Amino acid sequence: MAQERLPTFDDWEEQPAPERGPGLDVLLLDLDGYEGPIDVLLALSRDQKVDLRQISILQLAEQYLRFVAEARRRNLEIAADYLVMAAWLAYLKSRLLLPAVPGAEEPSGEEMAAALAFQLERLDAMRKAGENLMARPRLGEQVFARGAPEGLRDVARPVFEARLYDLLAAYGGFQARKTVTRLEIREAKLYSVDDALARLSYLIGAAADWQKLEAFLPPGLADPLYRRSAVGATFVAALELTRQGRIELRQDGGAFSPIRLRKATR
Amino acid sequence: MSEDAEVAEAPDPFEAERLIEAVLFASAEPVTLASLRARLPGVADVGALLDSLRARYSGRGVELVKRGEGWAFRTAPDLAARLHLEVPQTRKLSRAAIEVMAIVAYHQPVTRAEIEEMRGVALSRGTLDVLLEAGWVRPTGRRQTPGRPMTWGTSQAFLDAFGLESLAALPGVEELKASGLLDTRPAMIAYAAQSEDELQLPLGDDTVLLGEDDGA
Amino acid sequence: MSEDAEVAEAPDPFEAERLIEAVLFASAEPVTLASLRARLPGVADVGALLDSLRARYSGRGVELVKRGEGWAFRTAPDLAARLHLEVPQTRKLSRAAIEVMAIVAYHQPVTRAEIEEMRGVALSRGTLDVLLEAGWVRPTGRRQTPGRPMTWGTSQAFLDAFGLESLAALPGVEELKASGLLDTRPAMIAYAAQSEDELQLPLGDDTVLLGEDDGA
């Protein structure tokens, strides 16, 4: 793929398509008009036969190498990809001339040459297809649409979608917003980890044997939220004291089984 | 494109008519007789060709008409209404529009200012328009207060759209509360936890207690 | 505005044809069959009416043509030189742009990389843009290959611009397909596949070649 693009020439359509490819001199003069090495190869290939299927890739490679050599001799600036193509064609030439290495992994010279011929043929076909398309009567140039269109409108008639539920939910939301004008946040009564730590540190001294965690919960657990916070805080406190090496924890029955603890026995 | 029109073929009337047809079709403006003549050197009676063409299109969906000094094709007037097509297109209402709709429904007749006061925000331009376009709200009169503001209410189309027999079928505030659509409680998880029965687990069963919010 | 379009008159074929004529005349763009059908409720065979209308205009200065999914009236191409219409000069396409357009038309859906591979040069900035601006090419989806590159194809406007009924009417497309030249892959691979008889299959359905890994 080209790293650098050569400028195109816009006046292609004015140029009669050459029956035969341009001579080397024309090619070199026109260097700026070509879009990279493939383009030059296609131009050179017209020197040979009309049918690209019959083309001699070996001969084409030689022509191209002569073209590049001549360009360099004349100190013409040619882009790097022209040189890359030259190197590749020189390699291809050697592959075509030397007997194939038996058992070689890479494609043979003939296969490479055929692939190149295919690429040239395909590009040439597309070029001709483009010319054929442009030769057709085109809208706005040879064929015309209605000059005074009277407009054809597909008017969108909106149908709104809303369910009764949406309506009622909206009103509910609205009323709720209106009603709650003052938000009072009651103090949440929770058992703190600090309390749990103090209580557990104190009680553990008396617990020489394994005891359930629940045994260490504070009294007055009627309120469910308070009870949940007490369980959580006591558990966290137990973990902390275990980390400090002051107690030991065990849970024998897997997940959800009772957690037991005792004073560290060190 | 650069062809010599001067090297005109023998003025075959059929060909000349075709050319007139194409020129009139493709021109943005009506084409004058003089302009047509200039395109048809050698054709004696361009007027006759136009008459023939006019007859040809008579009664069709397209007619050849004279407009001022020029000639043009125009679609037949009786078809005009059917050229345009109304295509139903479902649109979703914005949340604001639905809320305003609800307020109109529950508080009608209501003025724009009252809606704004209730919602605590100004009504944006399109909101009422959309409801009007849907045909769900309609002006119901004017309030006898300074400025005589217009009041809004719901239409029959509103009842139809929401499948309501009458406005009385709209659930009242108490019913909304009962169905949970109107929730006045402050949403705080802590309070929710306090009031919910499922957490009144027997303390004795410690396994449940410990595992309870373990995975949550 | 009135809803009476549904309460359509008995679908008199003559009236229906008139309406089609008017609708197609009123629009500069091709009108899709679906859009025509929507205007002709109760008319069973819109296609037959179009055929009848096409026959009616056959050989006239204005012709009824099919362009992809749409139908339109267009001036007869043979009159081009004699119309003498004032047409804004269209910009000439560069050789590169024409080549790229042909590749997109014949190889669609095709990725940018494939176009570059086929042409042996990088696509310069303006080339695809010019075709996009003309409305002739459009993105058609993504290829399900690493990087999910965008694929390109031609639009309805392309068919209209070049007077093609469909992509099957592209000049020489059958021969190109049969000769294996519509293989998008790099030359080496494409050639190898060709020599393995794989492409000697009757290439009746282009989906094998073109649609293979179409992301659309």
Image: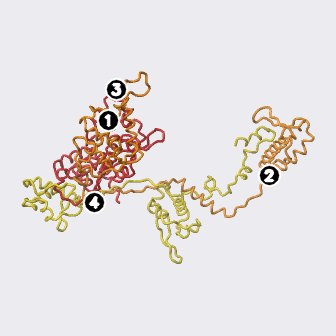
Chain colours: A orange, B yellow, C red
Q: Chain of mark 2?
A: A
What x and y, as percent, mark residue C120?
37, 41
Helix or strand or loop: what does disc 2 sit on? loop
- Which residue position holds label 4? A150
Label 1, label 3: how far apart the Cα atoms are: 31 Å
Residue drawn where x is 13% and y is 62% of the image: B38
Residue type, mark 3 in image? Asp
Q: Chain of mark 1?
A: A
Residue type, mark 4 in image? Glu
Helix or strand or loop: what does disc 4 sit on? loop
What x and y, as percent, mark residue B180?
63, 53
Between marks 2 and 4 in the image, the one whose residue lies nearer the viewer: 4
Instruction: Assign the C terminus of chain C to one quadrant of the image.
Output: top left
Residue type, mark 1 in image? Glu
Disc number for residue C197: 3
Disc number for residue A62: 1
Label 3, label 2: how far apart the Cα atoms are: 81 Å
Q: Which residue is most to the top?
A: A102
Q: Does any portion of residue C156 appear in the rendered image?
A: no
Disc number for residue A190: 2
